[in-house]
Image (cartoon, helix red, strand yellow):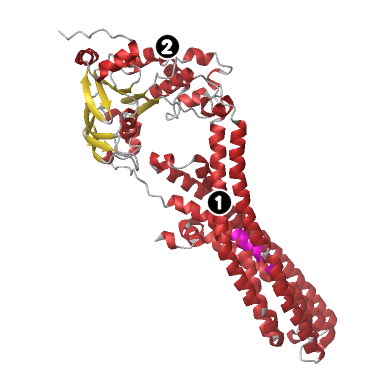
Amino acid sequence: MNRVLHPLRRVFLYLPQYHRQLWQAIACSILNKIFDLAPPALLGLAVDTLVQRQQSWLAAWGFLGITEQFVALAILTWAIWILESVFEYAYKRIWRNLAQSIQNDLRLEVYDHLQSLEMAYFEERSSGELLSILNDDVNQLERFLDTGANDVLQVLTTVLVIGGSFFAVAPQVAWMSMLPMPFILWGSIAFQKNLAPRYSEMREAVGFLNSRLSNNLGGILTIKSFTAERYEHDRVALESDAYRQSNRRAIAYSAAFVPLIRIVILCGFTATLVVGGLEAAAGRMSIGVYSTSIFIIQRLLWPLTTLGQTLDNYQRAMASIRRIFNLLDTPIGAHSGTRTLAVSEVRGEMQLDRVTFAYRGRSPVVKNLSLSIPAGQTIAIVGATGSGKSTLVKLLLRLYEIDDGAILLDGIDTRDIDLQSLRGAIGLVSQDVFLFHGSVAENIAYGTFDASFASIVEAAEIAEADQFIRQLPQGYDTIVGERGQKLSGGQRQRIAIARAILKNPPILILDEATSAVDNETEAAIQRSLDKITRNRTTIAIAHRLSTIRNADCIYVMEQGELVEAGRHAALLARNGIYAELWRLQTGDYAEPQPIA
């Protein structure tokens, strides 16, 4: 239902806490414009006083002398100008604060919704596209609320106030003054309808451009190492030119609006000037009313030339709002369960019961898989590339929803467990370590934000990271750079292990934790892993079989199915897939000895 609502109405309904502030801003904008339109009427009163004297409008209110009438006009002028200034200050302050508050709340709401979406959503979209919504589109709404909303209200107030006043005091020329209005409104509506798709196209183009730039900055090492700078420049130029062309199409259309509207406005102004003058000369209209009409017709019609710019900003904002709410309308695939578990109560027993999973639009990666992971034991999962090992990690963390079967933690279906509780009980050390821009200490304490410095150092010592950390320029306060680019792969890996140690989860998942490091670093990591896996459920996804030969049980997967299970020696004796993988890695092609 929300999809059919007008974008502005959705914003209004979406942020009810700002309704009072919004109505205050609207009232101040209208009142400011009313007082802004008063000076031409004061001019007419001054002319009327000079011409009519004792029969003037002010004389009817008891101000009989010329001096009294001009003193009254002076007081009225001061009052009007002061009130206009007061309401201008008020509407600018309220609109701008409102724009900043809505911008802040909407950006946080969009970001929170993004964090709640399953991993498949991010794999199908670029980070640049999402960043353009979080930044550009939210900022576009803020810019419209900052100035555009007031512009719309003041144009409407001008039309209603001046139009009503004209018909009240000079009905004989009012219809001529109003004659251009239907054409202006018709042109504005037609302009708006034709401009909307152009701005939607423009927002899509800037999303693609942001995506390209974000992707290239993240892959700058690859670009440089393959001397692909010119190639990437051409690709960025292509996306940038597409954005420029989409802007040009919108600009070409919007730029024609004001000149055309000026011609229509000229017709109404000329008619008022000529016909009103003839009426005044014939005595059928007072000089004061005629003077007011000449000045006020400009206040009515000339501001309409800015209607194009106002609608331009409006359409930009509407295109951005639609993109924002399209994202917010994206359903959350993995809903959190309601059952909470204290980490201290989790034993760590996990069981996969006939689990089947397929990535969207692809054949199943995991097929009818059943396996048991006893509490406190170390379980290894091995297999060739593409066998589904790393997918299991994502399923255990509920980063994806399984298509069939069940995954149990201590006998409880993980779909019934609160996601914070589930993921709080699991520590992940991934092959692709992500470090945030910040200090070494901050990255070790990530997820355990209240940890003391002593605890951080202790975790680093267990992970055999303390020695190299203290050799860094600022030790634990050293900034690691974006994604930890100032550190080596092995150093990043040991910081990731220290992070998991500090979290102290009952379940530890090691996803190829030593596959991308040298032998010396692997030995250091292996020593730290031997310490932290004691009395803890450990699931090791391994490529190097030497690191898991002492596991309590090794599961061998092939094309998403479990094909072998057992301890290292038993699997070698079976002379199956595991034995073949072992021979390929060690070069040991001797016939395995059977178990006695």
Question: How many numbered marks does the figure carry?
Answer: 2
Specify the amino acid type for callout 1. Arg
Q: Is residue 373 visible?
A: no
224 left or right of 544? right
Residue placed most toward the observer, 82 or 390: 390
Above or below 461: residue 144: below
287 left or right of 33? right
The secondary element bearing badge 1 is classed as: helix
Determine if the magenta segment contains residue 392. Answer: no
Instruction: Give the percent coordinates (x, y) of residue 140.
Output: 58, 52
Question: Quadrant of the rendered structure where residue 586 is?
Answer: top left
Instruction: Give the percent coordinates (x, y) of residue 479.
Output: 56, 24
Residue placed most toward the observer, 451 or 15: 15
Sequence-first disc among 2 and 1: 1
Q: Is residue 12 visible?
A: yes
Above or below 480: residue 183: below
Determine if the magenta segment contains residue 307. Answer: yes
Residue receiving disc 2: 519
Specify the amino acid type for callout 2. Asn
- Magenta range: 303-314
Residue receiving disc 1: 203
Above or below 585: residue 7: below
Instruction: Give the percent coordinates (x, y) of residue 57.
Output: 75, 85
Mark 2 → mark 1, Cα distance in angstroms: 49 Å
Instruction: Give the percent coordinates (x, y) of residue 54.
Output: 81, 88
Structural crowding at the residue carrying mark 1, measured as other residues with C-alpha within 10 Å and reported as few (<14), some (14–19) or many (≥20): many
Secondary structure character of the magenta stretch overall? helix
Residue depicted at 82% across the width and 89% down the height: 281
The secondary element bearing badge 2 is classed as: helix
